[in-house]
Amino acid sequence: MKDIRRLFSYHGAEHKTIFCYEHGKDLTVENVRPESRLHPRCGTSFLFVVIFLSIIVFIIVNAFLGVSNTFLRMLLKLFLLPVVVALSYELHRWAGRHDDLWISRALTWPGRQLQRLTTNEPDDSMIEVAITALKLVIPDQKGADAW
């Protein structure tokens, strides 16, 4: 599990670096280190939202349509999957933009708790890698990356 722990530490470094950038601080190890490793727009949290919403949507659809044929249920789920993912994306995006609202924090709380499992505190070398990676994708035009 040593390799997984290391991977999760890089995941934590990514979150800390993005938080530092979003707070408008210079991207240095000293500025990144104190940031949180739990981020409201984490991909892990997004997957949690997709799974949760798909369960809710498919329960509702099944209650109204009551399709008993396994093949038709599978086709219906495949047909609705883009809808579920789009709803999840918009919800996730809204929550990331409005992290100051209690409802947004409540919606992202389960995903942040899941991040406690998928992120670890990084060491300084991992933070340096995350800073270098982020600098490569920062757009030239200021504000082009705004949520």
Image (cartoon, grey):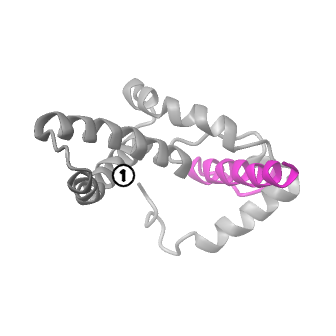
Query: Is the residue 112 above or below the residue 68 in the image?
Result: above
Most foreground residue, 1 or 87: 1
Instruction: Look at label 1 and name its amino acid.
Output: Tyr
Q: Main secondary structure of the magenta part?
A: helix
In the rendered image of this protein, does residue 77 appear above or below residue 129?
above
Q: Is residue 35 left or right of residue 143?
A: right
Q: Can residue 36 be seen?
A: no
Q: Position of residue 29 (x, y in %)?
A: 81, 53
Relative side of 65 to 83, left or right: left
Task: List x then y, in percent, for residue 44.
Answer: 55, 47
Q: Is residue 135 left or right of residue 10?
A: left
For residue 14, what is the image quadrant?
A: bottom right
Helix, strand or loop at mark 1? helix
Residue numbers of the magenta segment: 1-29
User: Residue visible at 48% across and 42% down?
Assistant: 48
Front residue of 70 and 30: 70
In the visual, does 85 lie left or right of 23?
left
Q: Which residue is mark 1?
A: 89
In this view, which residue lies farthest toward the front? 69
Res. 81 visible in picture: yes
* Above or below 137: residue 71: above
Residue 54 image offset from top left, x and y in percent: 33, 44
